[in-house]
Image (cartoon, grey):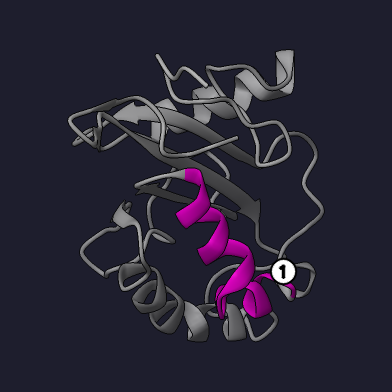
Amino acid sequence: MNGAGNTKMGKTEWQIAQINIGRLLAPHGDARVQPFFDALDRINAMADGAPGFVWRLQSETGNATDVQATPDPLIIVNMSVWTNTEALFAYVYRSGHAAEMSRRRAYFERFEGAYQALWWVQKGHQPTVAEGLSRLWMIDRFGSSPFAFTFKARFAEPGHIE
């Protein structure tokens, strides 16, 4: 799939949003998950400076780990918006982020159900946590669709003609 997509005078009207969630093995402050928290500032700075990065969910602390997205305090959420799927994919799988992600089993339980969703948003839109969780639910219940999809089953931006 080509991420350049639907354009007006060379500029896309769409950007890609993503959510991923995980359930920590232990609460923040526990030695078992401390290396994850120790790496957050570096990983967030890497995202902020990555080509194609637009926005990420964060609280006053500069990260999203203290955003209470569900009744379970061990579930943490990450959300961001990127110019296109290629930029997001490059950050997730081809940058220093990939090495940290490879250690996720050391800090997170194996997750039952969808833990990542992608969807197109109009340029300038900052998705809410509820919006992101609804996209995960849709993938869980119905699989990938233009409403919510994964890297493995991508959908072109709305109005894209190949």
From the viewer's perspective, is residue 47 above or below residue 80?
Answer: below
Residue drawn at x 25%, y 37% as measured from the top left: 126
Query: Residue 69, image x and y in percent?
Result: 45, 41
Q: Is residue 27 left or right of residue 83?
A: right
Where on the picture, by quarter, is residue 140?
Answer: top right
Query: Residue 78, image x and y in percent?
Result: 47, 53
- Identify which residue, 18 or 152, lies in the foreground: 152
Identify the element where label 1 is drawn. Answer: helix
Query: Residue 108, image x and y in percent?
Result: 72, 63
From the viewer's perspective, is residue 158 above or below residue 59?
Answer: above
In this rendering, does residue 159 appear at all? yes
- Identify which residue, 90 or 80, lies in the foreground: 90
Residue drawn at x 58%, y 78% as measured from the top left: 36
Name the residue beneath numbered marker 1: 104
Residue drawn at x 51%, y 51% as measured from the top left: 86
Q: Does 86 lie within the magenta span?
A: yes
* Chain part drawn in magenta: 85-102
Q: Is residue 155 left or right of residue 157?
A: right
Where does the N terminus fall, quadrant-wise? top right
Residue drawn at x 73%, y 19% as measured from the top left: 143
For label 1, count other residues whose C-alpha is less than 10 Å away and answer few (under 14), some (14-19) or many (20+): some
Query: Residue 121, image x and y in percent?
Result: 34, 28
Q: Main secondary structure of the magenta part?
A: helix
From the viewer's perspective, is residue 110 above or below residue 100?
Answer: above
Q: Does 132 lie within the magenta span?
A: no
Q: Is residue 107 left or right of residue 97?
A: right
What amino acid type should be assigned to the residue bearing mark 1? Arg
Q: Is residue 91 left or right of residue 45?
A: right
- Identify which residue, 72 or 101, lies in the foreground: 101
Counting labels gives 1
